């Protein structure tokens, strides 16, 4: 079986974990600080605040903006539930801007017309590792006095016009087990704003700046040094991880481009994709449905998956939620019905990639 994701941590991680264990300081301590510095440097921001998962990163980023009841966050309808859950957890109202089939991200051309008097935050999602069209989204935010919170959970190190995602506003990353960079569970918030960074550090630690000096109602959002020890060597070798994922994506595209009924993903001009997922679309000409393609690939030992089978709000618990406002999102619905992600991770060999291409070609001949 060629798995859709594989976790193999660098050997240096073992040494660092042992170092943490032997230090006796296993909760948030110096290793978390080391990870934060390394990650901030990786994405090109002055501040990175580690937290215990990517959902927490989104919640904390919204909480620090002190949204009021009725404030709206505009986001993508085609994302993991965490994006929507975080908006609701922060007490805001969620609204959606349809995506494009080219980048699977919020359609920047539609953002401005979706802004209302209640909109406070634009929350693009850099899905699959492809950055959203941030220059346009950031421009709308500037002109309307809105804040930007980037859901970069899947896009560590992706750039637009040479600028890192997460540098346009508050950036939120996940280090869940399947991500390009992982601590099992983990997250980080990035910001260029010194005051916001300081508030996030207080919020993460029960609202305390000094021991028992509370400044705001807070939470325990802390990451442990044990987890940070896993991340430090991965940050050091992250350029190679992305390079290998790019190579793999290119090899898949060379093998799959031009198949009738299949649309391969593209890296758009100016945007550096980090290939968290390699996601194809079955088009109306496809001889088999997306679900059949998935089943037949799995039978042949090619791991693949649907991320995501429905728009994020298309469940009763969200459809009936008073703070979820649903507009028509036909492109997201179409993509949810037809998308399929193939393995692209850095541990694949060229032989694996060729096997994936052969399997897809054969199934699509049916
Ligand atoms: C787009 C997106 N947003 C948010 C999250 C939440 O991250 P976590 O699972 O670390 O809480 C994920 C992770 O799966 C994600 O893919």
Image (spheres, rainbow, N blue to C red):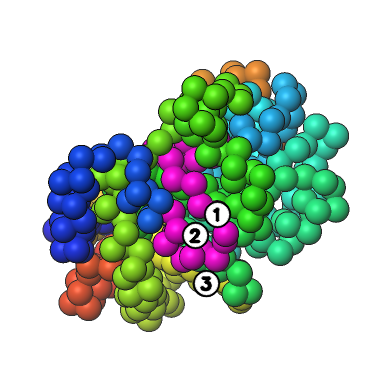
Main SS of the magenta part reads helix
Is residue 287 part of the magenta span, yes or no? no
SS type, badge 3:
strand
Of badges 3 and 1, nearer the viewer stands 1
Q: Residues within 10 Å of mark 1 (few under 14, many from 20)?
A: many
Please report whichever mark, 3 or 1, sits nearer to the chain's N-terminal start. Answer: 1
Task: Report the magenta residues as a range.
Answer: 36-60
* Disc 2 to disc 1: CB gap under 8 Å: yes
The quadrant where residue 347 appears: bottom left
Residue 254, position in %: x, y?
38, 81
Residue 26's label in the rendered image is none
Of badges 3 and 2, nearer the viewer stands 2
Residue 123, position in %: x, y?
63, 45
- Circle 3 is placed at which residue position? 272
The quadrant where residue 192 appears: bottom right
- Circle 2 is placed at which residue position? 40
Q: Residues within 10 Å of mark 2 (few under 14, many from 20)?
A: some
The residue that appears at 63% across and 74% down in the rendered structure is 161
């Amino acid at each position: 079986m060629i798995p859709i994701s594989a976790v193999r941590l660098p050997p240096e991680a073992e040494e660092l974990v042992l170092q943490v264990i032997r230090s006796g300081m296993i909760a948030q301590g110096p290793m978390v600080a080391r990870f934060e510095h390394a990650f901030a440097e990786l994405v090109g921001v002055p501040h990175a605040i580690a937290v215990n998962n990517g959902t927490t990163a989104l919640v904390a980023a919204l909480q620090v903006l002190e949204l009021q009841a009725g404030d709206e966050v505009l986001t993508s309808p085609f994302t993991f539930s965490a994006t929507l859950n975080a908006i609701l957890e922060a007490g805001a109202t969620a609204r959606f801007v349809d995506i494009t089939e080219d980048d699977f991200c919020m359609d920047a051309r539609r953002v401005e017309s979706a802004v209302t008097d209640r909109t406070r935050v634009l929350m693009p999602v850099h899905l699959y590792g492809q950055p959203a069209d941030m220059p346009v989204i950031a421009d709308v935010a500037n002109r309307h006095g809105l804040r930007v919170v980037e859901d970069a959970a899947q896009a560590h190190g992706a750039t637009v016009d040479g600028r890192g995602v997460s540098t346009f506003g508050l950036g939120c990353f996940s280090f869940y087990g399947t991500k390009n960079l992982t601590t099992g569970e983990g997250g980080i918030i990035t910001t260029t704003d010194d005051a916001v960074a300081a508030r996030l550090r207080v919020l993460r630690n029960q609202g305390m700046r000094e021991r028992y000096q509370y400044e705001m109602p807070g939470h325990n959002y802390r990451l442990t040094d044990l987890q940070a020890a896993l991340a430090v060597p991965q940050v050091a070798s992250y350029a190679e991880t992305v390079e290998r994922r790019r190579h793999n994506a290119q090899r898949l595209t060379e093998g799959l481009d031009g198949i009738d009924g299949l649309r391969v993903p593209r890296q758009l001009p100016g945007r550096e994709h980090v290939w968290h997922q390699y996601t194809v679309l079955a088009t109306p000409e496809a001889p088999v449905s997306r679900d059949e393609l998935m089943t037949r690939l799995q039978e042949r030992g090619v791991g693949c998956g649907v991320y995501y089978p429905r728009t994020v709000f298309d469940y009763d618990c969200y459809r009936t939620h008073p703070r979820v406002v649903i507009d028509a999102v036909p492109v997201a619905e179409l993509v949810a019905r037809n998308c399929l992600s193939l393995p692209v991770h850095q541990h694949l060999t060229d032989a694996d990639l060729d096997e994936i291409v052969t399997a897809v070609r054969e199934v699509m001949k049916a």
